Image (tube, rainbow, N blue to C red):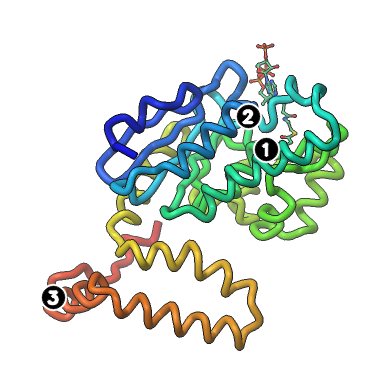
């Protein structure tokens, strides 16, 4: 997919390319970026077709909210069978985000609710602004999560916290989200995109195979029994080490040409 056409192909996504980083913004602010079938399809197409030049993605939402979740106006027309297919469409799109080629950093502000939290939890790093709040109103709407939330959210905050959110409608604010592990970075209002772009450029500077191993090997190993996980880790480590990019980086360090680990990289 050509990098120059890429940003112009999606009417519900606004895409800006900055060197190796693409900033993908949900662009349906009048509906609080509620996800209808078109938007889920565009997210899927966008992440499947990321041009090779792109090494990291920042994902954000236009307007006052990150995302109001499922577009509730499309719901009533669906049969049970169509509901399953619809949910699987969301799974396919969000799998492209979580298990694609490049790391994705979500910038959260305002409502991150229902399917919006499911989308956010498909990203690899979350940066939350002051205004962020999290909820799973599916319980109140007579629904259940259908965008991967029951698999992804407990892996971030645990089953008990997700049960509480779904059963009681509990809303977590930005600080609670940070304490419970929903976000990894907490920033002031309007600072999220700049922080995420800084992180994305840092990530894009890593060897592609290291990033790929973190996205694809690490979560699998974490779910394996320890003996199997350790064996897979050894294979992945040897493969990464064998890559010319790794050899070059190690040589650069030994020759004093690469950065040291410093405290300034803390956050
Ligand atoms: C929507 C949606 C939506 C807003 N579907 N149209 N998600 C929810 O249950 C959350 C529902 N939304 C809200 O609680 C609020 O809209 C917000 C807290 C997100 C934002 O409030 P606010 O005051 O800024 O906006 P608003 O006035 O409520 O909404 C502005 C417009 O967006 C309005 O439409 P309008 O034509 O009257 O201007 C709203 O109807 C529309 N809108 N949210 C459709 N979600 C795969 S399973 C996932 C299951 C779920 O995600 S369930 C949770 C759904």
Query: From mark 2 to mark 3, how far is it between C-alphas?
Result: 49 Å
Query: From mark 3 to mark 1, how far is it between C-alphas?
Result: 47 Å
Say if disc 1 is inside 8 Å of ligand 1: yes
Q: Earlier in the sequence, mark 2 or mark 3?
A: 2
Residue, disc 2: 35
Quadrant location, ligand no. 1: top right
- Mark linked to residue 7: none
Residue, disc 3: 256
Which quadrant, please, contains the N terminus? top left
Check if mark 3's residue and mark 1's residue have beta carbons within 8 Å: no
Q: Secondary structure at mark 1?
A: helix
Query: Residue 68 vs residue 208: left or right?
Result: right
Please tell me whether residue 142 is drawn above or below residue 209 in the rendered image.
above
Q: Quadrant of residue 264?
A: bottom left
Check if mark 2's residue and mark 1's residue have beta carbons within 8 Å: yes
Label 2 Cα neighbours within 10 Å, binned few <14 / some 14-19 / many ≥20: many
The residue located at (54%, 52%) in the rendering is: 98
Say if disc 2 is inside 8 Å of ligand 1: yes
Residue, disc 1: 115
Label 1 Cα neighbours within 10 Å, binned few <14 / some 14-19 / many ≥20: many
Whole-percent x, y for residue 189 in the image = 47, 33
């Amino acid at each position: 997919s050509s990098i120059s056409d890429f940003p112009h192909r999606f009417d519900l996504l606004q895409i800006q390319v900055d060197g190796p980083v693409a900033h993908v913004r949900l662009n349906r602010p009048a509906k609080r970026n509620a996800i209808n079938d078109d938007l889920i399809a565009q997210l899927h197409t966008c992440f499947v077709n990321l041009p090779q030049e792109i090494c990291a993605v920042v994902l954000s939402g236009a307007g006052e909210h990150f995302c109001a979740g499922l577009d509730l106006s499309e719901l009533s027309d669906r049969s049970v069978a169509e509901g399953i297919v619809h949910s699987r469409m969301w799974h396919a799109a969000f799998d492209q985000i979580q298990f694609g080629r490049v790391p994705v950093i979500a910038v959260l502000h305002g409502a991150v609710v229902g399917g919006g939290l499911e989308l956010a939890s498909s990203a690899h790093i979350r940066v939350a602004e002051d205004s962020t709040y999290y909820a799973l109103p599916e319980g109140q709407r007579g629904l259940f999560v259908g965008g991967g939330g029951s698999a992804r959210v407990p892996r971030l905050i645990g089953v008990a916290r997700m049960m509480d959110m779904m059963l009681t409608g509990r809303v977590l604010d930005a600080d609670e989200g940070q304490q419970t592990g929903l976000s990894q970075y907490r920033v002031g209002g309007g600072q999220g995109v700049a922080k995420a772009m800084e992180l994305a450029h840092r990530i894009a500077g890593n060897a592609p195979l290291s990033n790929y191993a973190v996205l694809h090997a690490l979560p699998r190993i974490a779910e394996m029994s320890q003996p199997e996980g350790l064996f897979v880790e050894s294979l992945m480590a040897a493969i990464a080490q064998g890559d010319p990019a790794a050899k070059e980086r190690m040589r650069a360090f030994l020759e004093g040409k690469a950065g040291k680990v410093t405290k300034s990289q803390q956050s």
